[in-house]
Amino acid sequence: MGKEMRIDVVSDVVCPWCAIGLKSLEQALENVGDAVDATIHFQPFELNPGMAPEGEEIGEHIYKKYGISRDERLVNAERIRARGEALGFEFGARERIYNTFDAHRLLHWAEEQGKQYELKSALLSAYFTANEDVSSHEVLARVAGLVGLDPVEAARILASDTYAAEVREREEFFQRHGINSVPAIIINQKHLISGGQPPEVFEQAIRDIAAKE
């Protein structure tokens, strides 16, 4: 039995570096093997909390938010695609970026059902690989069903404001504690690793923390 370790992953489902960070973390944990018994908890962070439900065209959004031109965006997109490919994750072409508050509400419910990891992974693939609208209640309920959650219950939760207060409370908690960019990986609630680091960075941190604690 490995050393118990809690890993909180603060991230969004439309953040490409969050997908890369998760895949890197998975590879690191695989490399560490039985030395560590990790439980992963996904915590909500919205890149664009004020975004309209229908979202925005991605190029326009990136230019408006970061001042990045189309050519720069294409270079960045290729870099992200190559990093993803090296980790076994496929980045397809994406046309829009969406509001993710409802996705985070569903992830909160999925945690209670013991299916949060599966739903998070499926939502990242739905958005980044399949170019799906992850603000759509229909898409969210269907993806929930694909990972073994009840799609009817998912639709009921999405049609209400269930878990809205809980998600906002968690978002505010991490912002108050200085998390203003993602992914943010917090080990045992005190060691912070920021960004979509390579697997070896996560692996070294996990081994060091396991040895000291």
Image: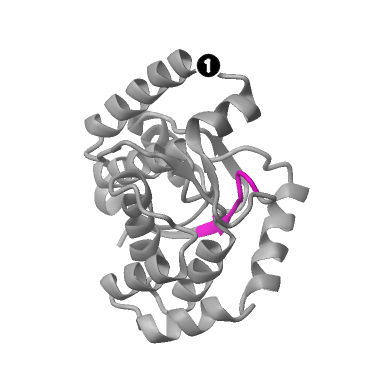
Say left or right for 209 vs 26: right
Magenta-highlighted residues: 42-48
Indicate the position of residue 69 as horizontal and vertical percent values.
Answer: 53, 16
Residue 196: image quadrant is: top left
Q: Relative to residue 117, is residue 84 depicted above or below?
A: above
Amino acid type for the residue under numbered disc 1: Ser
Q: Relative to residue 117, is residue 191 depicted above or below?
A: above
Pick the residue in front: 91 or 137.
Answer: 137
Residue 201: image quadrant is: top left
Q: What element carries label 1?
A: loop
- Residue extending farthest right: 176
Indicate the position of residue 85 as horizontal and vertical percent values.
Answer: 23, 32
Residue at (73, 48) in percent of width and height: 175
According to the picture, the residue beneath numbered tag 1 turns out to be 69
Indicate the position of residue 99 as horizontal and vertical percent values.
Answer: 57, 53
Indicate the position of residue 168 as horizontal and vertical percent values.
Answer: 70, 63
Residue at (47, 18) in percent of width and height: 70
Say left or right for 32 vs 197: left
Say left or right for 199 vs 7: left
Can I make out residue 37 in this image?
no
Q: Does the magenta stretch include residue 200?
A: no
Residue at (45, 21) in percent of width and height: 73
Pick the residue in front: 51 or 197.
Answer: 51
The quadrant of the picture occupied by the N terminus is bottom left
Residue at (61, 80) in percent of width and height: 162
